[in-house]
Amino acid sequence: MWRFRSQEVFFVVLLIIITLLTTSDLISDYLEGTEAWHLSIEALVVLMSVGGIAYLLQAFIKRQRELDAVKAQLAQTKDDLSEVRQQISATGQAYSQVIQKQFETWQLTPSEKEVASLLLKGLSFDEIANVRNTKEKTVRQQATAIYRKSGLSSRHEFAAWFFEDFL
């Protein structure tokens, strides 16, 4: 659907009015036998007005096509982004399953699995304690148990164990 700007409509209508009035005057002057130079000037004004209308309409059509192309490109980009998001989501879910399977291999308790997941998300001991409504000391003890069961010595080693292959 074409949408004209008010400025475009104003100038096209103005040029149409100028063209009609000048054409009317040109015909009237011709019938009265007005001199050729005067008729030539009025004919030139009519031609310039028609040219101006054509130019404005051509510019409008060009801008509309460009806008349609940008809209199509935006729609394609949105589709591509949606597809990438779905792929990332599927990959994240699959990786989450891998992580949970590793937690089971290490024989982590349900509480330790929850703490381990929160550690991987980058939460501090205090934040984990707040999320789980426990004391920070409890979270530290669970983290120590996680490190011991996994054979790793720190939070950084623990996170690196899972993310190293992505880098």
Image: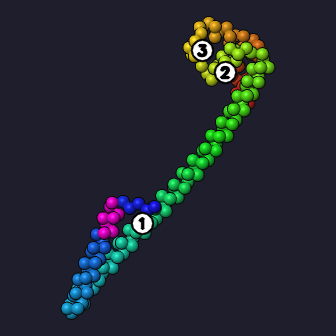
Q: Position of residue 125 (x, y in %)?
A: 60, 13
Asked whether disc 3 touches disc 2, contact meaning CB atoms under 8 Å apart, the reply is: no
Q: What's under tag 1, amino acid-wise?
A: Ala
Nearer to the camera, 137 or 36: 137
Does 36 sit left or right of 134 as displayed?
A: left
State which tag comes first along the sequence, 3 or 2. 2
Please tell me whether mark 2 or mark 1 is closer to you in this view: 2
Can residue 154 be seen here? The reply is: no
Quadrant showing the C terminus: top right
Give the residue displayed 61% in from the left and 47% down from the top: 80
Q: Which residues are magenta?
A: 6-13
Q: Is the residue marked by circle 3 packed among few (<14), some (14-19), or many (20+) residues within 10 Å?
A: some
Q: From the image, tell me which residue sits under label 2.
A: 117
Give the residue displayed 55% in from the left and 51% down from the top: 75
Q: From the image, tell me which residue sits under label 3.
A: 132
Asked whether disc 1 touches disc 3, contact meaning CB atoms under 8 Å apart, the reply is: no
Q: Is residue 9 above or below residue 77?
A: below
Is the magenta region chiefly helix, strand or loop? helix
Give the residue displayed 64% in from the left and 9% down from the top: 140
Q: What's under tag 3, amino acid-wise?
A: Arg
Q: Is the residue marked by circle 1 packed among few (<14), some (14-19), or many (20+) residues within 10 Å?
A: few
State which tag comes first along the sequence, 2 or 1. 1
Please tell me whether mark 3 or mark 2 is closer to you in this view: 3
Does 31 sit left or right of 9 as displayed?
A: left
Q: Is residue 97 magenta?
A: no
